[in-house]
Amino acid sequence: MLLLRNGRIINGTGEPSFDGSVLIDGERITEVGAFTPPNDCETIDCSGLAIAPGFIDLHSHSDLQVLEGHTAKIDQGVTTEVVGNCGFSPYPYVSDKEALRNYANGILCGDGEWGFADAREYLDEANRRANATNVVSLLGHGSLRTAFMGGSQNPATESEMQRMEGALDDALSAGAAGFSTGLMYAPGSGAPREELVRLLKVVARRGRVHATHMRSYSWELDESVEEQLSLARQTGARLQISHLQAVGQKNWAKQDRVLARLEQARLDGIDVEFDSYPYLAGSTVATQLLPQSALDGGTAAMLARIAHSETRAKLTEEINAQTAQRWSDIYVTAVATSGNQHFVGRTFQQAAEHWDTTPVEALFRLLTEEEGKVNILSFNQSEENLRKLMMHPLGSVISDGFYVKGRPHPRLYGTFAELLGGLVRDKGWLTIEAAVQKVTAKPAARMYLKELGKLVPGYYADVTVFNPSTIASRATYDDPCHPPIGIEHVIRRGKMFHRP
């Protein structure tokens, strides 16, 4: 048995914290609060420390890294990761793993010939190899479409539609926790409404969640939210809007309207919530800057379009019209070749000046030279909007972190310390109890994760002990790959995984 003695207990419910102890026997919590401990248990003095449930990252892209023992999350106090977000999952494939890798590797950042036939195969591997965190997986719509339709953005045939419905149902019955869509990413961007309706009805029938990277977070933010609410109303699938934000200064005023719309939808009976990361900048693949129709048919087809002068001119016009950020706010974070490594950490404005060209032409040149393998970071939103997202009762807090072969976003290493140190202690945006609830009980309830997310006798012994006075992220945009300080102990299923 393990006794965490004399700490400040933040039990995950949002209720006021209190002084007490936690007793762990095997994989379970047996006592919380004031009690007489057994004489023969191992004891950790938690005086001056907070004892909380293990943090749950509701939106992660570490699908492959959880299998490889990476510690970026456990070092932050995360004991459970929800992977398979934004339409990207490492399964399914029918006969062609390469097509799946070509689609998803820009986000999943895998080495070697990875790929899993179905949810059962992936989850079996996760249960066998993911020793640091619990793994909860969503089936990605883009991966599903790629398995049965390749890189096509055309509407599915009836045969393809039935096969996708069957594969989704099989995944949910095998243990996938839900379904994710990435409607800003090809090929999911080509899915018509009827396709989404049919797939979401499968999700609703299984009682699972639909997490969506919507079609737009900038110029068409309102319309994208309305599309998702309409789909949720029609299908009955519970809706989780991923990394909600208003991108680009000209769109910042839309956020209040969108939040009010979500509040009204809840009152109208739609089961909708959202999540956000505690940073002003986001990160993704550089092909996201293109009209997604340019990716129809895959990378080779995209590069051919860029190379064609007339198509290139049309793409330039569309990119200039749709890009909500300034080019000086969009940074290169990873490239594939050694010759362009000097662009990592530089903006597209700087790349354009280096090549004496325009930012769009710099984008085209990088994509061409790197065969599409370019990752970016962009500053998207205002601090006031971020504050409102962090404080909103419908919101959970996530990392949205993913690995790159370059310079990742600091959220991969710093999200949970940034929340508890930077936003709670330093800025006072939330109480510590409310913040902990947003990364424990709230995401657990959202994903129907039983016996997780609270310090309650009988629940699994997933526990994070941290120092509220010192917890802080050391990950910066320029130097992101550092674990936080102030995380003192992380316990998963009763086993100690992290000590300072």
Image (cartoon, rainbow, N blue to C red):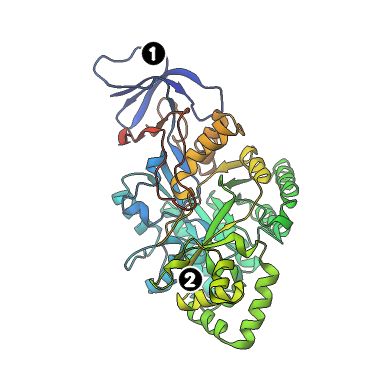
Which amino acid lies under the numbered mark 2 shown in the image of this protein? Thr
- Let me know if residue 460 appears in the view: no
- The 10 Å Cα crowd at callout 2, few under 14, some 14 to 19, many 20 or more, is many
Residue drawn 71% across and 61% down? 220
Tell me, for residue 146, which label it has, or none: 2
Rendered view: 44 above or below 289: above
- Residue for badge 1: 35
Tell me, for residue 295, which label it has, or none: none
- Let me know if residue 59 appears in the view: yes
Q: Which percent across, then down, holds residue 206?
A: 52, 51
Q: Is 285 placed left or right of 111 in the picture?
A: right
Farthest left residue in view: 40
Q: Earlier in the sequence, mark 2 or mark 1?
A: 1
Quadrant the C terminus occupies: top left
Q: Is 64 placed left or right of 272 in the picture?
A: left
Closer to us: 12 or 318: 318
- The 10 Å Cα crowd at callout 1, few under 14, some 14 to 19, many 20 or more, is few
Q: Which percent across, then down, holds residue 458?
A: 40, 27
